[in-house]
Amino acid sequence: GELFKTLAGKHSLVVVEHDMAFIEQLGGKVTVLHEGSVLAEGNLAMVQADPRVIEVYLGR
């Protein structure tokens, strides 16, 4: 995680990850993809609360 934080201070990074605790450590913008399209975008709290994300990934 520390390497990503250091690099993110100087570069743009694309991180593909399903571990939300790790993503939370990085901070920054989160983009959720579904079937090749952007489903939601924003900070982690915003995308986790997005009804479309909840429906697609949690089935609720």
Image (cartoon, helix red, strand yellow):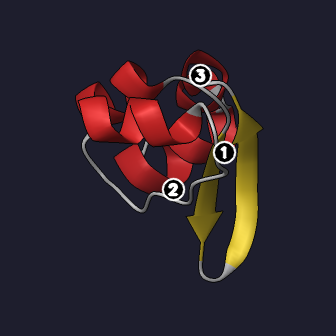
- Are the residues flagged by discs 1 and 2 in contact, CB closer than 8 Å? yes
Amino acid beneath label 1: Arg
The residue singled out by tag 3 in the image is: 49
Q: Is residue 1 visible?
A: no
- Percent position of residue 50, x then y: 66, 31
Mark 3 and mark 1: Cα distance apart in space: 9 Å
Along the viewing direction, whichever of 10 and 49 lies nearer the viewer: 10
Please say if the residues under marks 2 and 3 sit with CB atoms less than 8 Å apart.
no
Residue 45 percent coordinates (x, y): 57, 17
Crowd around label 1: few <14 · some 14–19 · many ≥20 (10 Å): some
* Mark 2 vs 3, N-terminal side: 3
The quarter of the image holding the N terminus is top left
Residue under pointer 1: 52
Mark closer to the observer (2, 3): 3
Kindly identify the residue that appears in the image at 59 percent across and 22 percent down.
Answer: 49
Q: CA distance from mark 2 to mark 3?
A: 12 Å
Front residue of 55 and 42: 42
Q: Secondary structure at mark 1?
A: helix
Q: How many marks?
A: 3
Quick one: label 3, few (<14), some, or many (20+) residues within 10 Å? few
On the image, numbered disc 2 is attached to which residue? 56
Q: Secondary structure at mark 2?
A: helix
Residue 11 placement (x, y as % from top left) = 64, 48
Q: Residue at x 66, y 21 (%)?
A: 46
In the depicted structure, whether residue 35 falls above or below residue 31: below
